[in-house]
Amino acid sequence: MARIFCIANQKGGVGKTTTTVNLAAGLSRIGQRVLVVDLDPQGNATMGSGVDKRSLKATVYDVLIGGAGVREARVTSEKAGYDVLGANRELAGAEIELVNLEQRDRRLKLALADAIGDYDFVLIDCPPSLSLLTLNGLNCAHGVIVPMQCEYFALEGLSDLVNTIKQVHANLNRDLQLIGLLRVMFDPRITLQQQVSEQLKAHFGDKVFNSMIPRNVRLAEAPSYGLPGVVFDPASRGAQAFVEFAQEMVERVKTL
Ligand code: ADP
Ligand code: MG
């Protein structure tokens, strides 16, 4: 049965989507069966997995609102090496449409139940907000992976997210836990980044993943080729860091 993880951080541009598609590709490389669920109306995880969001017959929107099954709506990305439940702009409307539906915060969980036997990992790329869409992700997950840049305000935003995880754990999903903080776009030459990294470790201990993802231009270039960096340039430092992270995740889930 698949382990389900949300990649979440309410800030935009912190590396959620890059983490989702590259962790997925890294896991696939080491033999894991993976489904990526794109919960962001921007559809970046969809496109970054080599799936054209404009040509999809069904998306996560149809699953959440229209009662479509995950097995009908998912597509396989041969290039990326995993399956994708895609998203496009239509998903932006779901936020409002969900409000009037039954089980509005559990609809993804109910829909995923059918398909999770097909996978070892389900990775959910969350939008940059603590919205009803994100709540649908958090409600079906075993854990949250938080990508973060080691910058001055990083810790401040983190407490909101940690509180949300605690509340969801207490009220809606007893399985949910913070799995770990992933330092991304890391540049060890920058003293401030080292300091924030040390603060993170002091605060969160072993919740900080050992792997860290360097700032690497190949990771930033890959989406324009419709590929995760791990597939686009496997020899790059960024790709290697994500394969290492995938290995760390495989070890980490054994302890859950
Ligand atoms: P989010 O999904 O949180 O909005 P993205 O994953 O889209 O963030 O990343 C934001 C931008 O930073 C993108 O242009 C992406 O290509 C770039 N980026 C992310 N991680 C790295 C990295 N490790 N090195 C270089 N660029 C990165
Ligand atoms: Mg994103």
Image (cartoon, rainbow, N blue to C red):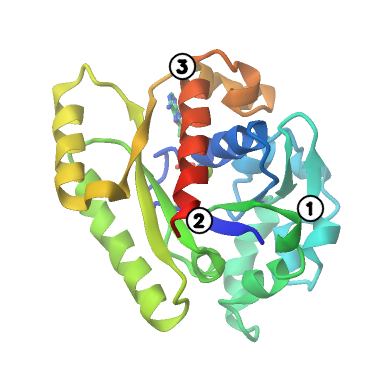
Looking at the image, residue 232 sits to the left or right of residue 11; the answer is right
Q: Give the answer, above or below, for where 69 lies relative to 81.
A: below
Residue position marked by numbered label 3 in the rendering: 237
Residue 238 position, x and y percent, is 47, 22
Please give the name of the residue rendered at 52% of the width and 44% of the height, measured from the top-left corner: 250
Image quadrant assignment for residue 118: bottom right
Amino acid marked by disc 2: Cys
Neighbor class of circle 3 (other Cα within 10 Å; few <14, some 14-19, many 20+) is: some
| Distance of label 1 from label 2 (alpha carbons) | 18 Å
Q: Is residue 222 visible?
A: yes
Q: Which mark is residue 186?
A: none
Say whether mark 3 is within 8 Å of ligand 1: no
Q: Which mark is residue 6?
A: 2
Q: Give the answer, above or below, for where 88 lies relative to 142.
A: above
Amino acid marked by disc 3: Arg
Neighbor class of circle 2 (other Cα within 10 Å; few <14, some 14-19, many 20+) is: many
Residue position marked by numbered label 1 in the rendering: 74
Residue 111 position, x and y percent, is 72, 70
Looking at the image, residue 145 sits to the left or right of residue 202; the answer is right
In the image shown, does 56 or 232 lie closer to the viewer? Answer: 232
